[in-house]
Amino acid sequence: MNDEKEIKSARERKLAKKKWKEEKLMKSLSKSLNESNDVETGPALKKIKSEGSSDVGPDSYKRRSTLSIAVPGSILDNAQSPELRTYLAGQIARAACIFQVDEVVVYDDLGEEESSHSDNEPQNEARPCCLQLARILQYLECPQYLRKHLFPLHKDLQFAGILNPLDAPHHFRQKDKTIYREGIVARRPVKPGRGSMVNVGLEKDVQINQVLQPGTRVTVKLNCDEYEDETSTGHSHKLRGEVVPPWQPRAHLDQYWGYHVRIANSMSAALSDCPFQGMYDLIIGTSDKGSKDIPAQLPSSDHILILFGGLQGLEMAVENNGGQLYKSVANDMTNLCDYYLNTCPKQGSRTIRTEEAILISLSVLTPKVVFKSGSFTLGASSES
Ligand SMILES: C[S@@+](CC[C@H](N)C(=O)[O-])C[C@H]1O[C@@H](n2cnc3c(N)ncnc32)[C@H](O)[C@@H]1O
């Protein structure tokens, strides 16, 4: 009887210690996030405590709202040198990160007629400017310690050295204490009965509980106990963790975790191949020809898409989509968009460039965003 009691209280002490360690790690994580990113982590911490360490699962992400922007790859072709081409792509990446954009759609606004594909190029291959813009966006979104593994030498990245870094909250340094990290499955033999090792940018690789293809990018949740012990006492442990869905850190911590890049071969593909459940439910077109009446608050939405045009604007992108239908849509862009807005009604220059329009429009529109469910700290949420 006494033995049983002792075992029970030892177990309780162990559990209390584990809980205390988790809380301590979360507190220090919240402190370092507040210091380095000025991110409001209070609600996120509450969420973690109430949910324990359970996986919030894809369903919780489906309930999360998202912000996407669509940008034509052709804007790179207007840059005057390969260096400026690269720098321009970097400006798009920085704008997306600054405004916590979840998805950047790089679309082809030139259509079939102006196709620059050579005869021996596969027909469904995206236009080179779209590929380069997408590649640079992905490169900048990727934490630096993973880049050499995920981005082999490529001419599109020849001038990547001049790019300004995103300094995104998920780009951790080795000393940063954090429960989630982006990683790459190491090319190391896996011992029988064990999981793969993952390089998460720490001194040591982390062992996960499953065997995955080497070279795969994964999001890892580190085992709090071992990680805390390792960082606070310096005791050497084998670090363990589990692979979680890439959206989990954002759902758990309410912390921006980068954007996803999608290439669309036309405007219609940009609109219809929405990766989020329920499709885009608010589409906003931008143009100097749009309405100057910006609503005080946008309708409550789940998945917002803001469209930007290239040199000849969105109408041309829609016309180039091909077919009579698109010609008539292009005559009145409100057929396609819920709003067609001029976000800089008093522009001094005759033209606003796409990269400038993205910054202007996102700073005008994001404060008016109302997300139906669980905002990502960006706009207001209609749920209290
Ligand atoms: C060089 S401009 C194209 C100019 C063209 N006249 C047009 O139709 O907007 C490239 C893109 O920047 C954005 N843009 C330019 N001026 C804007 C404005 N005043 N308000 C909102 N977006 C604008 C639009 O997305 C446009 O397609």
Image: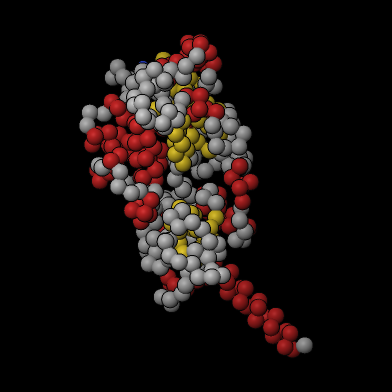
Between 310 and 371, which is closer to the camera in this rendering? 310
Q: Is residue 137 above or below residue 73?
A: below
Residue 267 in picture, x, y percent from top left: 47, 24
- Kindly indicate the quadrant of the structure image that contains residue 230: bottom left
- Kindly indicate the quadrant of the structure image that contains residue 16: bottom right
Q: Residue at x 66, y 76 (%)?
A: 12
271 relative position to 16: left or right: left
91 relative position to 200: left or right: left
- Kindly indicate the quadrant of the structure image that contains residue 292: top left
**Quarter of the figure with the N terminus:** bottom right
Q: Is residue 93 above or below residue 249?
A: above
Q: Residue at x 30, y 34 (%)?
A: 88
Q: Residue at x 42, y 52 (%)?
A: 170
**Quarter of the figure with the C terminus:** top right
**Total numbered labels:** 0
Q: Is residue 17 above or below residue 355?
A: below
Query: From this viewpoint, is residue 48 visible?
Result: yes
Between 198 and 313, which is closer to the camera in this rendering? 198
